[in-house]
């Protein structure tokens, strides 16, 4: 009996320790520095305007100074007045959280086109195409852009479909998010999170650090993908749904904002051809194989630890966009 009591006491102490550790982690994360994003009942998450300015180092070892956004959806307002308004919209590449504030690709673009465009950006890490569309609708009246440049990524299709995100390790943002239901034409909030991460922020933090280390040291964690991966035929079916959702959203954007010109580009090669077909179908301009301009230059990202553009990558992307948009 005494042994059982000691075991029970040890278990209780261990549970209390885990709870205190979780509370400590949340306290450090949200009160000392603050997260770059916070939860939102409609969009899933938005920029945290109460975040404290901080200094960090990206996966390339570059010093990064991050300033808080001044708007829950818009992370860049014009530095110079221009004759036309241009809005860059996208996910983490447009959030640009792995480079210093003011050094994203659209900041480089802005410096190249002083007094020609008033440059805005609305990018939030992890957003799928539906959230980007909802962002556009939400902020359009505030900006009234003449041009919208839509930055795409290969994982957008996963983020567009609940079943795909639920079955993904790397591209599951572990947050409630809105999904578009093609059958009902309705937006639904669903939860793709792994059960452990629904209550423990600390376990999510540790897990993704381990995934990052696995890319570098091959720890074998990638084998976990097989335990949740969908059958290839099922995956392809849902991927087609994700592309259909993007097409519908772009079509709705054209109808809703007929006087705005839309451009698009992708930061990687996955679905680049499909994206081009969708943009062309809706009479939009798409910069095919844009990613090659950046990828063909060495040291523009932090692979294998992080595929996001570093400072050099953003500089090249901004310069290329300047040339491409000048030709149109």
Image (cartoon, grey):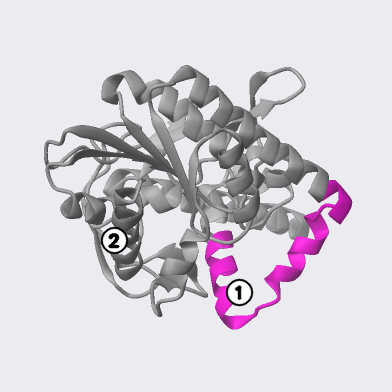
Q: Is residue 246 magenta?
A: no
Q: Nearer the viewer, mark 1 or mark 2?
A: 2
What's the distance in space between the residues labelled 1 and 2, CA to CA?
34 Å
What residue would you read off at disc 1? 214
Say whether disc 1 or disc 2 marks the residue closer to the N-terminus: 1
The disc at residue 319 is 2
Residue 2 image position (x, y, % from top left): 75, 57
Q: Secondary structure at mark 2?
A: helix
Residue 271 point in image, percent of width and height: 64, 53
Closest to the observer, 113 or 36: 113
Tell me the residue at 77%/21% (across/down).
183
* Quarter of the figure with the N terminus: bottom right
Camera-side residue of 101 and 299: 299
Horizontal relation, residue 224 to residue 149: left or right? right
Q: Is residue 271 left or right of residue 99?
A: right
Q: Is residue 146 left or right of residue 83?
A: right
Q: Residue at x 55, y 79 (%)?
A: 216
Magenta: main secondary structure equals: helix
**Extent of the magenta region:** 207-235
Please name the residue shown 49% across and 58% down the image. Answer: 267
Residue 301, quarter of the rendered image: bottom left
Crowdedness near tag 2: few (<14), some (14–19) or many (≥20) residues, C-alpha within 10 Å: some
Picture quadrant where residue 277 is located: top right
Residue at 74% in and 50% down: 167
> Where's residue 309, x and y in %?
40, 64
Identify which residue, 131 or 2, lies in the foreground. 131
Q: Secondary structure at mark 1?
A: helix
């Amino acid at each position: 009996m005494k042994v059982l009591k000691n075991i029970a006491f040890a278990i209780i102490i261990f549970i209390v320790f885990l709870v205190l550790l979780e509370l400590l982690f949340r306290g450090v994360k949200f009160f000392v520095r603050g997260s770059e994003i916070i939860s939102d009942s409609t969009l899933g998450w938005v920029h945290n305007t109460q975040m404290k300015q901080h200094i960090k180092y990206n996966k390339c070892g570059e010093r990064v100074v991050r300033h808080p956004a001044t708007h829950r959806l818009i992370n860049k307002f014009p530095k110079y007045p221009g004759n036309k308004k241009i809005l860059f919209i996208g996910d983490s590449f447009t959030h640009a959280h792995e480079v210093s504030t003011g050094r994203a690709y659209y900041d480089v673009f802005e410096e190249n086109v002083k007094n020609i465009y008033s440059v805005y950006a609305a990018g939030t890490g992890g957003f799928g195409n539906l959230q980007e569309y909802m962002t556009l609708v939400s902020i359009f009246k505030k900006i009234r852009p003449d041009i919208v440049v839509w930055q795409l990524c290969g994982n957008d299709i996963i983020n567009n479909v609940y079943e795909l995100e639920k079955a993904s390790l790397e591209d599951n943002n572990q947050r409630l998010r809105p999904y578009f239901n093609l059958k009902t034409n309705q937006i639904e909030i669903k939860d793709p999170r792994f059960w452990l991460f629904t209550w423990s922020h600390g376990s999510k933090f540790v897990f993704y650090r381990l995934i990052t280390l696995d890319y570098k040291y091959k720890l074998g964690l990638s084998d976990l993908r097989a335990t949740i991966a969908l059958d290839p035929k099922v995956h392809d079916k849902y991927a087609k749904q994700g592309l259909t959702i993007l097409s519908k959203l772009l079509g709705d954007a054209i109808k809703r904002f007929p006087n705005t010109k839309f451009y698009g580009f992708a930061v990687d090669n996955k679905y680049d051809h499909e994206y081009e077909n969708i943009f062309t179908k809706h009479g939009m301009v798409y910069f095919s194989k844009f990613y090659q301009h950046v990828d063909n230059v060495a040291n523009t990202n932090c692979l294998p630890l992080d595929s996001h553009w570093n400072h050099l990558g953003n500089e090249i992307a901004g310069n290329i966009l300047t040339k491409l948009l000048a030709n149109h």
